[in-house]
Amino acid sequence: MSGADDLVLVINSGSSSIKYQLLDPESSFVAASGMVDRIGEKNAGIEHHIEGTTVERHVPLADHTAGLRLVFETFAETGHDLASQGVHAVGHRVVHGGEVFYRPTLIDDSVVEAISNLSSLAPLHNPANVAGIESARKLLPGVPQVAVFDTAFFHGLPDAAKTYAIDAKVAAAQGIRKYGFHGTSHEYVSGRVAQLLERDPADLNQIVFHLGNGASASAIRGGHPVDTTMGLTPLEGLVMGTRSGDLDPGIVPHLMRSAHLDIDQVDELLNRNSGLKGLSGVNDFRELQGLIDEGDAAAKLAYDVYIHRLRRYLGAYLIGLGGVDAITFTAGVGENSPQVRADALAELSRFGITVDPALNNAKDRAARHISVPGAEVAVLVVPTNEELAIARAAHEVVVAAAQL
Ligand code: ADP
């Protein structure tokens, strides 16, 4: 294993979980990774992967500090004492940077306060991110910590793409605009596409589909996003595991009036009980495919709605960009479901888009082309690596700060 002082600890704190990776930002070598989950519950625990082995422990954890302490203890027990050997930097994934943060930012008290103040825009995410940051600062005093924002890549979206057509004064007062999310992934993947095509990013029009539990698409011109599906919150756009994506906003007052749901129940319905789960009962794509194979009509409808929405945005972005050089699939579903890729791009040869069935079905985990050789539009599968992108961003910020 490399010395810990070459390594960056990447932390992604959710409401009841902490995902982490210790990795070398230059070589991308992953020294260890894992996840603490069910924070706040009796059956909390950790799954820690190091040097080909997995360590599991179950202990009640009161809060994120207890969770991160367990991460540090587990590192120490497996021969890698983070606190005493020191790590070079900690990179935190932060979901919402609002209008304030549009680049990776060295964390101090005022940054923590500003991220906390953005919680009204991301009530499910930013408080958890702040808890992770505060815990890491307590447990690793003196190690520089950097916030990397999911919204940052989309900060410069054109006005026409980011503006909602509502009362402009209300929008301004409430910070209502399209922010976009999964930015670290869209930026990383579109950068990899330019490398793979051996083209200058400035010369490429791209569409990227990040299809995981959460899902989003982006249209990127010359390395800069010009549109994306997620909005003020990560609820807008594509159909997701448990989130509805786009719907008629009139559905919200209708539900409140007619079904007597309060605002928290509507929030819960749209974020946790909609999407594939709401339509079919399952949010995991493999389970959905299993149900479809058994002839389950609701699962088939859920799949059809999912593909219909993907193609709607594909069309919008093709036109919005005025033509496209590359279409790329990434994240759990995008990387692993040849069926989704084939159906999303079926019968588009008149637009220069033709997927090669053999390349598409190949069981290959590497970044690769799946379009027919010589096709006008390159179609690719590129594994995302948000942790590596966060580690690199944190490393760059720390190196730049040290040179000041
Ligand atoms: P997130 O990071 O948003 O939690 P991921 O990018 O890990 O999500 O993607 C999770 C999704 O990927 C799940 O719906 C899962 O079923 C799907 N997935 C993972 N492996 C496969 C596979 N081999 N075939 C189809 N879907 C898969």
Image (cartoon, grey):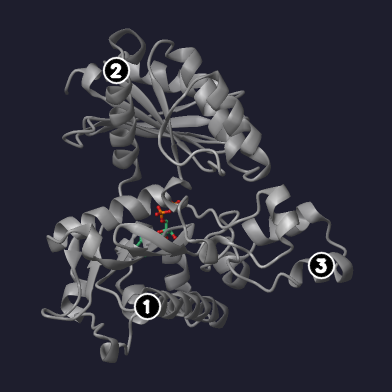
Answer with mark 2 or mark 1, whichever residue precedes in sequence.
1
- Above or below, 102 relative to 212: above
Residue visible at 49% across and 57% down? 214
Q: In which quarter of the image is ligand 1?
A: bottom left
Amino acid type for the residue under numbered disc 1: Leu
Spatial separation of the CA atoms under disc 1 and disc 3: 33 Å
Amino acid type for the residue under numbered disc 2: Ala
Comparing marks 1 and 3, which lies closer to the viewer? 1
Residue 244 image point, x, y percent? 60, 66
Residue tagged by mark 2? 402
Contact between labelled residues 2 and 3, with CB atoms less than 8 Å apart: no
Amino acid type for the residue under numbered disc 3: Pro
Count of residue discs: 3
Label of residue 318 in the image: 1
- Above or below, 283 relative to 42: below
Query: Which quadrant of the rendered structure holds the N terminus?
Result: top left
Nearer to the camera, 256 or 51: 256
- Above or below, 349 relative to 398: below
Nearer to the camera, 225 or 348: 225
Answer with mark 3 or mark 2, whichever residue precedes in sequence.
3
Tell whether 401 sits left or right of 19. Answer: left
Residue visible at 37% across and 73% down? 321
Neighbours of disc 2 within 10 Å: few (<14), some (14-19), many (20+): few
Query: Which quadrant of the rendered structure holds the C terminus?
Result: top left
Residue tagged by mark 3? 253
Tell whether 292 sits left or right of 348. Answer: right
Spatial separation of the CA atoms under disc 3 and disc 2: 52 Å
Residue visible at 62% across and 30% down? 40
Nearer to the camera, 166 or 125: 166
SS type, badge 1: helix
Residue 317 image point, x, y percent? 41, 74
Answer with mark 1 or mark 3, whichever residue precedes in sequence.
3
